[in-house]
Amino acid sequence: MKIISVEGIVVSQTPFKENSKILNIFTKDMGIIGCVSKGCKNLKSKLRVISERYAYGTFHLYYNDKGLSTLIDGDIKDYFINIKSDIIKTSYLTYICDLSMNVYKESENNEIYDLMESAILKIEEGMDPKIITNILELQYLNYLGINLNLDCCVKCGSSKVVTLSLSKGGYICQNCRTNEMIINEKVLKMLRLYYYVDISKISNLNIDKKVSDEIDNIIDEYYQEYSGVYLKSKKILKTLEG
Ligand SMILES: [Zn+2]
């Protein structure tokens, strides 16, 4: 076994023996690594903090590519103090980690980690967790293989779009529209922005609540109908938000 240092976040944990845990660390470059953190439940253990759920930083491991690795030490990069002091934001963190793991399992693309990390850091900075999560969900469609065409009419290529059809997979123009309801122009424009924005570069989110709520509904519906991803953490989030 070799020693490696990886950046990542603890996305799930299970108790193991009396004082230990088995962690799943979603890493920046090596996907999801399962590892044993021996004795980390002891108050004096140096592994205690780095082995907590959503611990984010650098992990030093004895790496085993055929089974469980072993955590040796770690350095926390950010404690997510802002997120953890708020139950709603914490629920978003849970959902984002859950969703990201699921999306990663579908496509094993390292960009997924970067998107997840940017989204979490923006929520920690104080940005609206719902909007940031919607942006992430929309950008994940690519990795789930259910991309929406948000450039032009999905049927004829016209740029004069008037609505979105989830079943047809994108924008629709007036000529190609059949029974779809017209969608507010602002919502259509904002959806496209959500889709293409670099999350790490967002510095403010000045979005009308009606618009962002409508986008949230659209994304929800699309995930439910087409993604095949059903997460308990999403249900809990919806319940919490009432
Ligand atoms: Zn058309």
Image (cartoon, grey):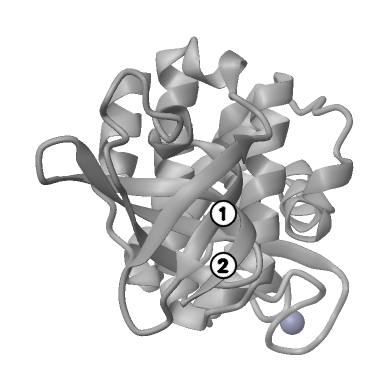
Q: Answer yes or no: do the residues labelled 1 and 2 have beta carbons within 8 Å?
A: yes
Q: Measuring 40% from the left and 16% from the top, which residue is drawn there?
A: 87
Disc 1 on helix, strand or loop?
Answer: strand
**Dot label at residue 240:** none
From where the camera sits, is residue 37 visible? yes
**Real-space Cα distance between discs 1 and 2?**
7 Å
Q: Measuring 32% from the left and 35% from the top, which residue is drawn there?
A: 40
- Residue placed under numbered mark 1 in the picture: 60
- Residue placed under numbered mark 2 in the picture: 3
Taking the view exactly as shown, the residue that stands out farthest to the top is 85
**174 left or right of 108 in image:** right
Q: Measuring 49% from the left and 18% from the top, which residue is drawn there?
A: 84
Taking the view exactly as shown, the residue that stands out farthest to the bottom is 156
Q: Nearer the viewer, residue 162 or 242?
A: 242
From where the camera sits, is residue 220 visible? no
Please determine whether, in this image, residue 231 is positioned above or below residue 20: below
* The C terminus sits in image quarter: top left
- The percent coordinates of residue 230 (x first, y second) are 28, 58
